[in-house]
Structure formats: structure tokens, C-alpha cells
Amino acid sequence: MIIKPKIQMVDVGCQELRTAVWPGKKGARPILFFNGIGANLELAAPLADDLNGRSDFIAFDAPGIGGSPEPTWPYRPWWLARAAKKILDTLGYDEVDVIGVSWGGGMAQQFAIQYSRRVKNLILAATSTGVTMVPGDMSALSKMAAPSRYTNPEYLKKHYQTLYGPSEQESIHEHAAKIIPPTLKGYNFQLLAMLGWTSVPFLPFLSQRTLILAGDEDKIVPVINAKMLKGLIRKSELKIIEGAGHLFIVSHPDDVIPAITRFCDGESVVDMPDLTVSAAHA
């Protein structure tokens, strides 16, 4: 079911952020989504649609990304977490489930520790502990570091498999059609935001139930990083998706959506059939 989002600009203090809400069932706990580096909110649409309107789904463009104005100054993860809180306050949301993908996974971790009262469940996909991560394939990482995959369609087509893995090739046209190129300043400020940042010191103090998702063919964030997250987060479960690259959150809905919905409903994914999962820590 295709759900049309309501899009608006939200003032978070000296910066406006383009924000979308895909409407869901009344009274259901909403989902706050943190996107990957350079990714505009339209790229989250397949995930929002696959969740079939189970709850309001909130996504926003970081400064200089998609339809958000360029940032005036560099920012850090704590600032983006505060901006996300301001969005929730403005839209009238209190407790949420949080999903973070890749770069956005770091922001989701920051938000969960910074505003722990606001987060019921945390889902981390294709992400790491930040600067302490185990790096992926250098060919893929070097291509990810430049915004060309968003600004040059031919570059994206040529290097899609290198970036995202062979299993993601079928999704290239749908992915490319939704791209709004980021500004160079916006993209570089996203890179700078994570410079020196790591979640390692605070992950043992996370109180939320956490689902960690990883693709076993992810060339950008290898599976070992998901295992590191699980080792540091007490109330965590790990699901490894076989044959999946970096974009599995939208390319493998049959694996991802049942796990997310079940987890957000307070159930464990450990006993789900045909899933490669690891039991939660005691």
C-alpha cells in the first residue's frame, strides 16, 4: 500500500529541516527514522510503505540534504539529536520507536542515549559504533565518501554493485529515481559530524530494547560491526540477513519488516523461523 506523506518545514532553531510524516494507525507508537549520509527522505518511502501504516512514520532531511537548507555551521551528533527532538515536540509526539540506518544509525544511538525517555525500542541497521568501527571494503568506502553517487546517475550505475553489493542491483532504478542530490556543503558537514565520534562509552548504558540488523554481503559496514554493537548493548538481539548488501532495509522487506514489526510489538525475533539471529544478552 502506497501512503502519501505530509511534508513540511520544521524550525529547529537557526535551521529549518524538511520533515515528512507517513500517517499510520491512531494511537500507535510512531517511528522516528534517521537516514543514511546524503540520503533524502524520499529514499525512506519504501520502508514506510512496507510498514503498511502500522504507525506514523517520521523522517527528515539533514541540513543541506534533500529539501533542507544548507547548514550555516558544522554540527555534531548531539545537535542533530536535539533537532530531532524539536521535530517530535513540534509535531506533538512523545515516546517513539527509533530506526537508524548506516550514518543515521549513529544518530539513532545518540538520540537514544540523549533522550532515553523518548525511546521505547531502538532498531539499528547496517551501522556501527562510529570511528571505532571495523572498516569495510576500501573500494566501496572511497566511493561512498564522495557525493557523486547522489549527483551523477552514471557514476551510481557504474559503481552500484561495488557500493551496495551484487544482491542490490535490482533496486538501482527505484533507488536512483528517488534521489535528490545533496549540496556539497551539506554532504561534507554530514561527514564532519561523525569525525571522532564513537558510541562505545555509552552503549553499555542504553536502557532500550535494541534490534541490530546486518547484511552478510554489506561491503560498507561489515557484519563484525553488528556483532560489536550486540556485545556492547545489554538488551539486544542480532539478525543477520543472508545475501543482503548495504541497502537491505528496503531491498529485503520480507526479512526486515516482520522482524521490525514483531520487535516493536515487544516480542523477540530469536524464535522467528528462517532467520539468522542471536539471542539477547541477559
Image: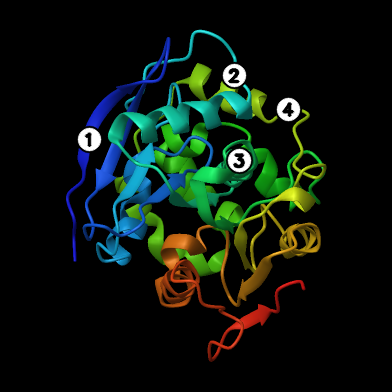
Please identify, in this view, whether the residue under mark 3 or under mark 1 is nearer the observer.
Answer: 1
Q: Position of residue 206 (x, y in %)?
A: 69, 51
- Amino acid carrying mark 2 in the image: Tyr
Give the structural element (helix, strand or loop) at label 2: loop
Report, in whole angstroms, how far the alpha carbon at label 2 lies from the one at label 1: 24 Å
Q: Is residue 107 above or below residue 50?
A: above
Which one is earlier in the sequence, the residue at label 3 or at label 2? 2
Give the CA separation, mark 3 to mark 1: 28 Å
Residue type at mark 1: give it: Ile
* x then y, percent, for residue 159: 54, 49
Numbered mark located on residue 75 in the image? 2
User: Looking at the rendered structure, which numbered label has been put on residue 144?
Assistant: 3
Badge 1 is on which residue?
7
- Residue 93, position as x, y percentages in the image: 34, 41
The mark lying in front, picked from 3 and 4, is 4
Q: Nearer the viewer, mark 4 or mark 1?
A: 1
Residue drawn at x 70%, y 79% as measured from the top left = 279
Question: Which label number is shown at residue 195?
Answer: 4
**Does label 4 or label 1 sit earlier along the sequence?**
1
Helix, strand or loop under label 3: helix
185 lies left or right of 114: left
Identify the mark at residue 161; answer none if there is no mark.
none
Mark 1 falls on what kind of element? strand
Question: The N terminus lies in which quarter of the figure?
Answer: bottom left
The one of 85 and 48 positioned closer to us in this rendering: 85
Cα–Cα span, label 2 and label 4 = 11 Å
Q: Nearer the viewer, residue 272 or 37?
A: 272
